[in-house]
Amino acid sequence: MANRNETGSTASGLRQLRRATQGNAAPGTEARDSRLTGTARNPWRTMRTTFHQERMTMIRMLSAFNLKPGEDETAFRAAYQDFITELHATCMILAADPPGRRVRDTPMDTGDNYAQEFFSIMCFRNRAQLDEAYAHIEERMKSSTTATHLRMYRRITNSVFLCWEEDAE
């Protein structure tokens, strides 16, 4: 199984960026991280600037859903990881978190009217990447070649997708 950093985990990516911008990057990360900026010449300075510019317009999408009856949670999580890996490899998303399960037995969960049990957040670099990802899905639906997306979508029910723009710092 790929580690979370290779699949674009938001938390590990942010930790890596913090280390890089503080001049304390782990050995061997320079080549891997320079892909984020498209430059091998002083990637840390460019990465810091690029990240700051992108962060101001980052789009996040919350996916809230239930698994279809009979769907095995372990198998779903493995398939979701493959789905995210593909989206990340094709630059359709910037990052994504693994699905989380709802915690209802706390006063902090006030969504009594919401039935969804699973949640995940995907990050898009900006509105253009979000729109490009949707156009890609829509185009592939017309040609019936959305195998990965459809396989994932067929495993869930009662889905809701909410997008928001990241607040500027």
Image (cartoon, rainbow, N blue to C red):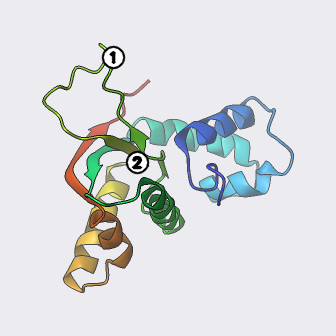
**Picture coordinates of residue 45, whole percent (x, y):** 69, 40
Badge 2 marks a residue whose secondary structure is strand
Query: Which disc number belongs to residue 122?
Result: 2
Determine whether, in the image, residue 17 is placed left or right of residue 88.
Answer: right
**Picture coordinates of residue 152, whole percent (x, y):** 35, 65
Query: Which disc number belongs to residue 80?
Result: none
- Which residue extends farthest left? 113
**Picture coordinates of residue 105, whole percent (x, y):** 32, 21
Circle 1 crowding by C-alpha within 10 Å: few under 14, some 14–19, many from 20: few
Determine whether, in the image, residue 32 is placed left or right of residue 27.
Answer: left
Tell me the residue at 57%/36% (across/down).
11
Query: Which disc number belongs to residue 106?
Result: 1
From where the camera sits, is residue 104 visible? yes
Determine whether, in the image, residue 60 is placed left or right of residue 83.
Answer: left
**Picture coordinates of residue 38, whole percent (x, y):** 63, 59
- Which residue extends farthest right? 27
